[in-house]
Amino acid sequence: MAKKRVSTGLPLGAYVLLDGLGFFLSVGPGLVAWLAMLVFLRWKWADPLFLAWALLAPLVLIFAFVGTLFLFRLALPRLRVGLYDMGVNLGTFAWACHLALSRAAEVCGLRPLLNSFFWTKFLHWRALGMKIAYGVNSSIGVSFVDLPLITIGKGCTISEGVHIACHTFVGDRLYVGTVEIAENVFFGMNCTVGPKTKVAKGAWIGMNNLLGGDTIAEGEKIDSFSWERGNPAKARAKG
């Protein structure tokens, strides 16, 4: 009989280290960005054209934030595809670091601003390592996790509430995989996309579908509420 795996969790010191590092990665970029904007405003305070300079303050905030994200990401270990024990190892450590860094925009209150414009979205997501084409049409309410392993082609539309993540848990282990979305793909509202998913050019995914480990063919259409990890929900319900 095979021996059953038993999860013993992490040592207390490991939790403290991950919390501390996660706090730094989530809070640090926003802190740098807001301080840079305040320093810029203070520098121009006595200038007769201060009000005109103040209009540029949001740009200072955005570029400082995006630049800090990029530098922080360069210092992190590379996020790699694999199956990892939830213990002290490079795979789970890298995943936890990138996860914390991806939360920075939410923590510092910049996510609505960054997700409102094509150029800010592009710079933000590229700074976090996502391979995304410029001009992807997406809602403010989209959510991406494990960005270095996500690829999204040009002409795609990502609707409100879509969540794309490149990790899942298999028992007490962490699986990290890629998500590849080709050109001109449409995702309806509230879809969830998990690791090891490939969506070919021109596919149309209706709302409230769950993809994970699926390969969607070129031009394929999936109706709303009809797909759950490779199993058409309507066909399963009829059976």
Image: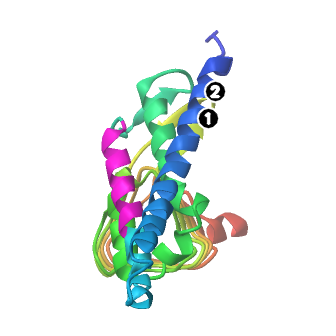
Q: Nearer the viewer, residue 228 or 114?
A: 114
Q: Is residue 238 above or below residue 138?
A: above
Mark 2 residue crowding within 10 angstroms, few (<14) / some (14–19) / many (20+): few
Q: Quadrant of residue 232?
A: bottom right
* Callout 2 touching callout 1 (CB < 8 Å): yes
Per the image, label 2 sits on a secondary structure element best described as helix
**Is residue 152 among the parts visible in the rendering?**
yes
Image coordinates of residue 70 in percent, x first then y, are: 33, 53
Identify the magenta region.
63-76
Residue at 63% in and 68% down: 235
**Is residue 199 among the parts visible in the rendering?**
no
Q: Is 149 included in the stretch rendered in magenta?
A: no
Q: Nearer the viewer, residue 140 or 209?
A: 140
Q: Given the image, on which type of amino acid does mark 2 rest?
A: Val
Q: Which residue is mark 2?
A: 16
Image coordinates of residue 108 in percent, x first then y, are: 57, 61
Q: Given the image, on which type of amino acid does mark 1 rest?
A: Asp
Q: Which residue is mark 1?
A: 19
Mainly helix, strand or loop, the magenta region?
helix
Q: Is residue 165 above or below residue 239?
A: above
